[in-house]
Image: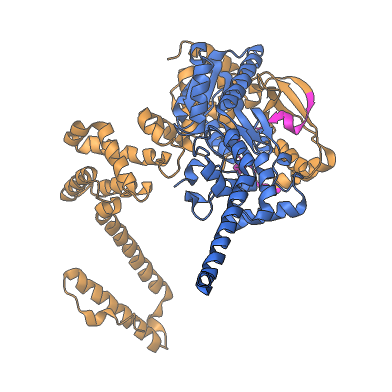
C-alpha cells in the first residue's frame, strides 16, 4: 500500500461528496480557442451532434455565457480543459467558419493526480464507446494511491458501476505481459480487453476441474494456449468462451456428460487447432434447441386449445393442416427413434 | 574515284554524318547542363538512399523534354536539402531552448519524457538516439519511452504525476501520422503533462492538427505552402509552368503526383525524402518507368 494513501484518502474524503468540489475556484479570464487544450480523455464520440449544433447556434448568437473551467499547462502558454469540452468544440467549429469567439474561462490550479483521475472517470461514464483498458489502469492508480480495494467503495468513488469495477479488476488480475497485448497500437494484432474478461472463467474452471493440467501448465501457460488459439483464429468471437461454462453447467445432473465436457476442455486447451464452437456446440446447442422445441410445442397446443376448433363447421382446410402437422411430427418421432422414412420428409415442405 | 562516289558510298557517308551530328548534339546537350549536374551532385551530397552521381543526374534530367528543362532546374533549386549537420544543429538547439524554457516553469529534466514515435530504425529513433547522446539527456535524468510501450508510459506518468512529454521525429507533413500515434497514446497519460513535438521541419498543415490537440510544435523551421513551387498556394512558378509540371507529375503517377495528401513538400533530408515530396523528384516505386533524382528508400528497387 502506498505510504501516502492515508493522506490521499483524507484529502479525498473532503471532496468525495460532490464531484464539483474536485474543481477548485479560480480567476476569470477570456481566452482564444488557440489558447485552449482539449481533454484527451474526452473523445468526440461523447457528444450527440444535434444538441451540439443547437449549442453552437446559441453560442454563435450570444457567445459563451457560462465560463469553462481550465488550468494552466506548465511550460506551455495554453490552458487545459477540465470542464466545458462541448462549448469549446462549438467554438472550434465556429472559428473554422470564420467567426472569432473569445471564451470566458475560470482558471483554477491544476488538479492533483487523483482528482484528475476521478474527473476522468466521471467523463468515461458518459462515453458511448470506450476501451476498458485505460479505465482499468487508471483504477489501478486510484486503488494503489488510496489503498482502497473494495469494489463497492471504488464504485462510489469513481462513479463506475459495480460490474465495471469488477471487469476492471479482472483485467488487472492478468499479468502485465498480457495487459500489454491489449495495449498494442496495431489493431490487427491487439488482443481485445474483452478476451481477458471472457477467458477468466475458463481459467478458473480449468484450475478447478483439471488440476493436473493446471499444475503442469500453470495459469499463465493455459492463458498462453488460449492466446495462441485466438491468434490462430480458433476463437472466432471471445463470447464463444461462454459456451464452455454453459456446457459445464448444463451437465450438472449428468455425470457422464460432465466428464465428457471436462475431457473436451482439456483437449480444447491442449489442441490449438480445436475451435471453440466445434468443441462445445454439441453440449450446448442441442439442449438449447430442445428447449426451444419444447416451448414451441407447449405454445402450439395452448394456441390450438384457445381456438376451440372442435365444433367448427368448415373443417376441410383445418383437417388438411392438422394432418400435415401429424405427418411431420410422426416423421420427427421416427427419426428420434432411429428410423427414417425419407418419403415423409418432404410432405409439408412441398405444399 | 568514280567508284568511290557510287551510291552505296554516298549513303554510308550521309549516315556517318548524321551519326556524328547526332552524337555532337548529344554531347553538347550533356555539356550544356554540366554546371547544373555538378551543382546538384555537390548540393545533395551525403543523400543516403542513393548517392548522387553524374550518371543518375543525367539519366533523370534526360527524361524531360527540352522545353521543360529550365523549369525543372528552377524546381530543383527550390528544394530545401537538410544535411546531417543541419539536422543535428536544429534539433540540439531547439531542444536546449525547450529545456531552458521548461526549467523556468519548474519542470526539471527528471520530469521530462522523450517519446520515440515510430519503430527502431525509423527517423524518429535515429533523431532521438542522436539527441540522447549529443544532448546527454540520460545523464540529466530524462526518461525515454517508445510510443508502442503504452504500459510503460502509463506507469511513468503515474509515478511522475506532472512534467513534459516531448515527441521526437524529423518531419511532419499533414500531421496525420503523428496524431495517429499520439492520440491513442495520450489516453494513458496520468497527471498533468505539457506536450511538445520536437523536429527539424514541420509543414504548416501539421501546425493546425497539433494546435487542435494542444501539442506545441518545436521545429527547426516551418515549411510553408508558399515555398513549395507545385503547391496551389505558391507563386514561385507562373500558372502555365506550374500546370505543366503538375501535368508531368500526374503522368508519372496519377495517384501520388504531388506526394502524400498533395502536400508538394520540397524538404529532403540526408537520410530520406518524405513521402510528401512530388513524384517528379522521387521517381516511381522501384524506379520503374520514371527514375527520381532523390528517391525514398522505399522507392528503390
If the image is split into quadrants, where does the N terminus of chain A sit? top left
- Chain A drawn colour: orange
Q: Residue at x 39, y 36 (%)?
A: A181
Where in the figure is residue B119, as x and y percent of width and height? 45, 34
Where in the figure is residue B161, as x and y percent of width and height? 55, 18
B290 displayed left or right of B174: left
Q: Nearer the viewer, residue B171 or B106?
A: B171
- Chain B drawn colour: blue
Where in the figure is residue A185, as x and y percent of width and height? 46, 37
- Location of residue B162 with respect to A121 vertically, above or below: above
- Location of residue B79 with respect to A152 vertically, above or below: below
Q: Residue at x 49, y 32 (%)?
A: A134
Q: Is residue B29 visible?
A: yes
Q: Residue at x 30, y 57 (%)?
A: A285
If the image is split into quadrants, where does the C terminus of chain A sit? bottom left
- Location of residue A85 with respect to B231 vertically, above or below: above
Q: For the view shown, which residue lies furthest in the front direction? A: B1
- Callout count: 0
- Location of residue B240 with respect to A333 vertically, above or below: above
Magenta residue span = A29-50
Q: Assess whether residue B260 is covered by the magenta stretch.
A: no
Q: Residue at x 51, y 14 (%)?
A: B136
A168 displayed left or right of A273: right
Q: Assess whether residue A44 is covered by the magenta stretch.
A: yes
Where in the figure is residue B24, as x and y percent of width and height? 59, 53
Q: Nearer the viewer, residue A17 or B107?
A: B107
Q: Nearer the viewer, residue A154 or A36?
A: A36
Q: Quadrant of residue B14?
A: bottom right
Q: Is residue B154 visible?
A: no
Amino acid at each position: 500500500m502506498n505510504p501516502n494513501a492515508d493522506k490521499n484518502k483524507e484529502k479525498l474524503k473532503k471532496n468525495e461528496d460532490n464531484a464539483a468540489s474536485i474543481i477548485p475556484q479560480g480567476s476569470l479570464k477570456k481566452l482564444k480557442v488557440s489558447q485552449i487544450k482539449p481533454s484527451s480523455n474526452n473523445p468526440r464520440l461523447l457528444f450527440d451532434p444535434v444538441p451540439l449544433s443547437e449549442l453552437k447556434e446559441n453560442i454563435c448568437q450570444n457567445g459563451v455565457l457560462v465560463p469553462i473551467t481550465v488550468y494552466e499547462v506548465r511550460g506551455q502558454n495554453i490552458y487545459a480543459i477540465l470542464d466545458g469540452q462541448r462549448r469549446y468544440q462549438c467554438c472550434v467549429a465556429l472559428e473554422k467558419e470564420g467567426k472569432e469567439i473569445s471564451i470566458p474561462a475560470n482558471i483554477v490550479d491544476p488538479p492533483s493526480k487523483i482528482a484528475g483521475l476521478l474527473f476522468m472517470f466521471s467523463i468515461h461514464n458518459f462515453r458511448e464507446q470506450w476501451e476498458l483498458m485505460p479505465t482499468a489502469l487508471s483504477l489501478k492508480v486510484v486503488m494503489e494511491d488510496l489503498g482502497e480495494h473494495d469494489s463497492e467503495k471504488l464504485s462510489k468513488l469513481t462513479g463506475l458501476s459495480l460490474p465495471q469495477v469488477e471487469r476492471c479488476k479482472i483485467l488487472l488480475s492478468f499479468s502485465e505481459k498480457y495487459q500489454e497485448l491489449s495495449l498494442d497500437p496495431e489493431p490487427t494484432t491487439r488482443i481485445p480487453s474483452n478476451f481477458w474478461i471472457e477467458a477468466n472463467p475458463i481459467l478458473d474452471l480449468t484450475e478447478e476441474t483439471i488440476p493436473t493440467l493446471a499444475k503442469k501448465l500453470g495459469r499463465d501457460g493455459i492463458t498462453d494456449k488460449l492466446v495462441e488459439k485466438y491468434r490462430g483464429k480458433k476463437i472466432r468471437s471471445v463470447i464463444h468462451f461462454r459456451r464452455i461454462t454453459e456446457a459445464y453447467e448444463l451437465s450438472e445432473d449428468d455425470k457422464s456428460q460432465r466428464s465428457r465436457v471436462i475431457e473436451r476442455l482439456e483437449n480444447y486447451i491442449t489442441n490449438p487447432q480445436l475451435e471453440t464452437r466445434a468443441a462445445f456446440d454439441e453440449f450446448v446447442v442441442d439442449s438449447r434447441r430442445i428447449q426451444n422445441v419444447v416451448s414451441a410445442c407447449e405454445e402450439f397446443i395452448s394456441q390450438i386449445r384457445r381456438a376451440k376448433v372442435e365444433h367448427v363447421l368448415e373443417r376441410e382446410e383445418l383437417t388438411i393442416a392438422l394432418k400435415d402437422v401429424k405427418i411431420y411430427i410422426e416423421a420427427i418421432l421416427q427419426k428420434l427413434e432411429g428410423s427414417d422414412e425419407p418419403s415423409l420428409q418432404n410432405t409439408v415442405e412441398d405444399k | 574515284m568514280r567508284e568511290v562516289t557510287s551510291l552505296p558510298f554516298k549513303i554510308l557517308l550521309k549516315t556517318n554524318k548524321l551519326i556524328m551530328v547526332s552524337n555532337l548534339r548529344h554531347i553538347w546537350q550533356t555539356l550544356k547542363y554540366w554546371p547544373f549536374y555538378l551543382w546538384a551532385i555537390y548540393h545533395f551530397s551525403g543523400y543516403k538512399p542513393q548517392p548522387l552521381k553524374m550518371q543518375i543526374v543525367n539519366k533523370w534530367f534526360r527524361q524531360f523534354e527540352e522545353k521543360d528543362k529550365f523549369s525543372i532546374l528552377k524546381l530543383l533549386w527550390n528544394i530545401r536539402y537538410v544535411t546531417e549537420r543541419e539536422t543535428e544543429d536544429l534539433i540540439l538547439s531547439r531542444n536546449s531552448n525547450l529545456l531552458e524554457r521548461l526549467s523556468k516553469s519548474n519542470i526539471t529534466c527528471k520530469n521530462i519524457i522523450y517519446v520515440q514515435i515510430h519503430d527502431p530504425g525509423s527517423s524518429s529513433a535515429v533523431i532521438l538516439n542522436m539527441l540522447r547522446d549529443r544532448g546527454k539527456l540520460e545523464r540529466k535524468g530524462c526518461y525515454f519511452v517508445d510510443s508502442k510501450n503504452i504500459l510503460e508510459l502509463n506507469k511513468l506518468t503515474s509515478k511522475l504525476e506532472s512534467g513534459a512529454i516531448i515527441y521526437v521525429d524529423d518531419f511532419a507533413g499533414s500531421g496525420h501520422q503523428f496524431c495517429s500515434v499520439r492520440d491513442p497514446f495520450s489516453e494513458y497519460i496520468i497527471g498533468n503533462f505539457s506536450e511538445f513535438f520536437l523536429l527539424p521541419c514541420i509543414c504548416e498543415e501539421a501546425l493546425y492538427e497539433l494546435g487542435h490537440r494542444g501539442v506545441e510544435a518545436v521545429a527547426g523551421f516551418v515549411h510553408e505552402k508558399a515555398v513549395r513551387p507545385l503547391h496551389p498556394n505558391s507563386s514561385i512558378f507562373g500558372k502555365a509552368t506550374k500546370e505543366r509540371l503538375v501535368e508531368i507529375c500526374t503522368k508519372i503517377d496519377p495517384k501520388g503526383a504531388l506526394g502524400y495528401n498533395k502536400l508538394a513538400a520540397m524538404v529532403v533530408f540526408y537520410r530520406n525524402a518524405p513521402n510528401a515530396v512530388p513524384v517528379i523528384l522521387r521517381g516511381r516505386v522501384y524506379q520503374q518507368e520514371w527514375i527520381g533524382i532523390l528517391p525514398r528508400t522505399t522507392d528503390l528497387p
